[in-house]
Image (cartoon, coloured by chain):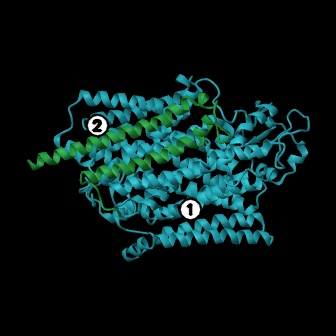
Chain colours: A green, B cyan
Amino acid sequence: MSANNADDVRDRYWAKTRNLTIVVLTLWAFFALVVPAMVSTLDQYTFLGFPLGYYMIAQGSLLAFVIIIWVQNWRQDAIDDEFGFGEEDE
Amino acid sequence: MALLQGRFIDNIGRVYTLYTGGFLAFILLMALLEQFGVGADTIGILFVAFTIGIYALIGWLSRTMEVDAYYVAGRQVPAVYNGMATAADWMSGASFVALAGGVYFGGYGYMAFIVGWTGGYVLVNSLMAPYLRKFGCYTVPDFIGTRYGGNLARLCAVIVLVVASFTYVTAQINATGTIAARALHIPFSWGVWFGLLGILLCSMLGGMRAVTWTQVAQYIVLIVAYLVPVIWMSNVQGFGLIPHFTYGDAASTMAQLEAQFGLNPPAEAIPGLSVLTTPHTGPVGDYAEWRFITLALVMMCGTASLPHILMRYFTTPTVRAARKSVAWSLLFIFLLYFTAPALATLTKLQLLDPSLPTAIIGKPFEEVASLAWIQNWASVGFLAIADQNGDGILQLNEFFMRPDIVVLATPEIAGLPYVISGLVAAGGMAAAMSTADGLLLAIANALSHDLYYKMIDPKADTAVRLVVARILLLGIGALAALIASLQLTGILGAVAWAFCFAASGLFFPLCLGVWWKRANRAGAVAGMAAGFTAGTLYLYYVYTGGTPWFGLDHLRFGIVGMAVSLVSMVVVTLLTPAPDEEIQRMVEETRVPTGPSILSDQH
């Protein structure tokens, strides 16, 4: 019974981890693939004096990647802790 | 040694603070010497010699005869420092020396490298790093070999790893040669061997442990050397305090200058040197968006499959620390990449904008030819001006430059003191050396651990394994230097190939190894072999003059390789039986952060 329970915990843990990963990869695809695809449209707007499309490629998407990873790790740590898989920090 | 290591880990913050302070003091000392009339050449030599001396000292202090320390730095590198080491490992001669130059000449299209080389870390963090860390492997083929089982899978992974990393390392040694040639006034072919010597000093004795601690030191040098000149230049030339937020207008006015001078090909091309013909800010040409996306995508997938990067995350104490160090890595890398387009824009503006004192385009030819920086770079063959239309005025298409030197020449173009040029040379050297170290170690470790120990002589004892690893390191380094001295391709081109090779062969077998329990040995072998072969054949096809399919040129051949790899891996896996119970349990175990790693410490 306890083995089944452990398996169940793992399955739920993995389902949550997988869902988080899917959200992260969707955001990633937006900034990495969709933004460059519509750069000409974005270039019609300006931001800080830059054409917006150019700005997104030179800085905006990069910043988005940094934020995505930090937020992902914060959420993943929470999931780990929720299921008792959290580790001591070094 | 163990005692020293413990003390070092405890004091690591203080050690690197002292080191950074020492480096800044050294820069000030050099600035003072310059004021007292010490020659530019001497300052350049001192910069390069001093920094390489420091790295060699760290390498010697970290020497080891323990397997765990040699392969994975004892798995005790704190996340922040592993982030710095990864950033140095990652930012190569291509990023430091060649990237801004690529953007300068290639315009918007080359910024796909910037997006690709940062966005890739989202894939590393989501798909690979934490799971490979949990696995507890020493090398990337170690994961493939254990997850899928069997020597054939391991061997395929070793082959892809060696080809990708070797392509990459020749580009790095090329970069060290370029810098050493200019800074030390020696021929390029000597510069290559000089660079190799520095690289081996860091990695021979201490393996991963030595490389880790030198890479942290190299990151500090390279980021200071990249940011200081750009910010200084921006302040001297009145572009604003922090140029990153204020160069928007410069980017906008570039189009007017381009129209004014005309983006025309030269009347007579000079081999190896480029003329500006591509607009700065927008996509141009057929398939422009598609070409951008494919290049960015293949660079991202390559990032997530390049073994010298993945193995850095084997050195952290825990899975959580591995994830955290990916986040730090990207932050440290971001600092350089969001500066590169600013550097390219401002440097171009200084040469083009007639209202700035540094402008050369549209000026009398004789006046430009007498500038010291033009003469210095022309004398080593990296730059040329030629009054091809005979009007006595330097036109935009009469100014030839090797793209790889834009970053190195920027301080001189902006008229900054020579101490900044010396600093940039030291930074470029640090970037190229740190990456070359990581790559050589990845190759030598795969050959010594996976090929020699796991496949040829499983009974070999520790001392023999480590001696084999070092001999391989020496041999591979020498071979890479030999090939680099032939100068077959530019720095950026060779690096793009390395990413394509890695993505073609390794991306799906690694990723599906964690994310698809059903994936089996036959599928993985098919994915690696077919993907890698298809990519290589396609590269051969386009490189020998074949018409690219959908604009997929030689920089993007990994797209073809990856598509073939994915399809063959899925199809073959589904046609063959699922992996046995034990392997499936292993995959489940990999997905959970806690508990013992799959491979024991002394495997």
User: Contact (CB < 8 A) between labels 2 and 1?
Assistant: no
In this rendering, the answer to whether A38 lies above or below B375 is: above
Q: Is residue A71 left or right of residue A64?
A: left
Residue B463: numbered disc: none
Can you see residue B597?
yes
Give the mark nearest the N terminus, 2 or 1.
Answer: 1
Q: Secondary structure at mark 1?
A: helix
Farthest residue to the left: give it: A1
Q: Is residue B258 left or right of residue A61?
A: right
Residue corresponding to mark 2: B516
> Disc count in the image?
2
Q: Position of residue B489 (x, y in %)?
A: 61, 41
Callout 1, which amino acid? Ile
What quarter of the picture does the N terminus of chain B occupy? bottom left
The residue that appears at 38% across and 32% down in the rendered structure is B565
Q: Considering depth in this image, is B47 or B280 the residue closer to the camera?
A: B280
Q: Position of residue B322 (x, y in %)?
A: 38, 55
Q: Considering depth in this image, is B39 or B513 the residue closer to the camera?
A: B513
Q: Secondary structure at mark 2?
A: loop
Residue corresponding to mark 1: B220
Callout 2, which amino acid? Trp
Q: Is residue A82 left or right of residue B490?
A: left
* Mark 1 closeness class: few <14, some 14–19, many ≥20 residues within 10 Å: some
Chain identifier of the residue bearing label 1 in the image: B
What quarter of the picture does the C terminus of chain B occupy? bottom left
Q: Position of residue B306 (x, y in %)?
A: 44, 45
The residue that appears at 44% across and 59% down in the rendered structure is B82
